[in-house]
Amino acid sequence: MATTRSKVVELSEHTPLQVMMFGMLSVICAIGLFTMVAVPTVESFFTAFLRSEVVRDGSSVSYRIAENREDEIVVTSTYTRWALVDPNELRLPAGSSPQLDATGKPKLRHAEYVFSPIIAFAPLVIVGGFVLAALLTTVVGGAAGLVRQKLEREILTALDRLAMAQYGEHTQQEITSLAREIVSANLRSLHDLADRFAIPFSQLELLRNAIHWRDSNGALRLWRTHDAVKFYMREYFTDRYSNVILGLVYMGAAVLIIVIGIRGLKFLPATDPSVVLGALGLEFMLLVTYAVVLMYGRTDEDTSEHVRESGPVSATQLDSDTEHLLRAFLGVQRSSTSDGDRS
């Protein structure tokens, strides 16, 4: 038992190298999502649905933030500033000289909208990079396997809990034997084991699938990653962080309300929707995260069963104590009645 618990403690501790590698992997994934997914997708959307040409090659365009303001010159960029212009504006035949304004300078194309992709895409790519890095670290091991270590910790904790209920003080060999018995059980035997361990069948089935993931290698481990993630979400993450996620959803809604309110007061120009899209993206990702927590969380039946099993006093114990009290009460009553008859 000491060996099992020391292993759990070892799996619970993460080195600075693991955290640093996970952070670096999250940043790399976020940058990859931004450059290879978000940028080309939104550019295609602007071109197809808004009938606009996206200028982001570093050239300058003229832009008017409001009707009562003068035109200003905006320098475009791939990551910080896009300009949406009319594709037919100032389009000249090849080899012709550019048009000049009143000062003799070449005319600039007028931007109907300006767009800051970093602000608009930041919530989406940050959360997406974090999730993608988490999925990748469930497959690899060693210093890069941060999430994999968490999953193995919860599997070992669940096995230790079952072994404690089955054997009391137990050894590592008994943990291994218990895991082998769960993995090799068929559907009927798994129901019998669930009755023997006094746990819901769905919980034991999740544990068996997670053990299958732990004992797999290569492509088979990757294929069974969902089972391990589902077990981890059900047994650990949803119980501990569901309220935190719900609080973040409300905070995101508050940010969105403030941004929409400021936009309604026209403190944010209609021709620059980056902040509004960023707030919408933030609330979207938080709602998706909360939906995932609800899908992988315990059902009402599992929750009530879990409370009955983990409570300080079980229903069986209460029934036994009530029976003893009734027997004692009836015994006292009979003794009192017998003494009265004798007198």
Image (cartoon, rainbow, N blue to C red):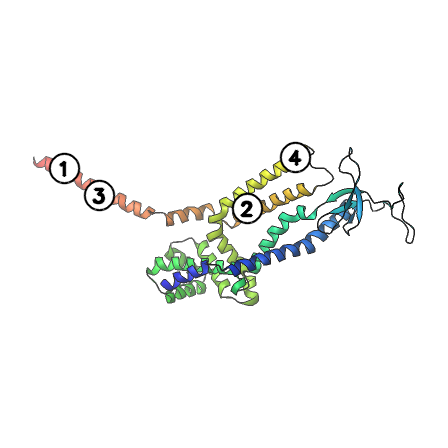
Sequence-first tag of 3 and 2: 2
Sequence-first tag of 3 and 1: 3
**Callout 2 crowding tier (Cα within 10 Å): few <14, some 14–19, many ≥20:** many
Sequence-first tag of 4 and 2: 4
Q: Nearer the viewer, residue 142 or 139?
A: 142
Q: Identify the element where label 1 is drawn.
A: helix
Q: Which residue is mark 3?
A: 327
Q: Furthest-right residue in view? A: 96
- Distance in Å between CA atoms under marks 1 and 4: 81 Å
**Is the Cβ of the residue at disc 4 closer than 8 Å to that at disc 3?**
no
**Callout 1 crowding tier (Cα within 10 Å): few <14, some 14–19, many ≥20:** few
Sequence-first tag of 4 and 3: 4
Residue 51 appears in the rendering: no
Q: At label 2, which amino acid type do we have? A: Tyr
Q: Which residue is mark 2?
A: 290
Q: At label 3, which amino acid type do we have? A: Arg
Q: Nearer the viewer, residue 337 or 39?
A: 39
Q: Identify the element where label 3 is drawn.
A: helix
Badge number at residue 260: none
Q: Which residue is mark 4?
A: 262
Q: Identify the element where label 4 is drawn.
A: helix
Report the quarter where the N terminus lies.
bottom left
Q: Which residue is mark 1?
A: 336
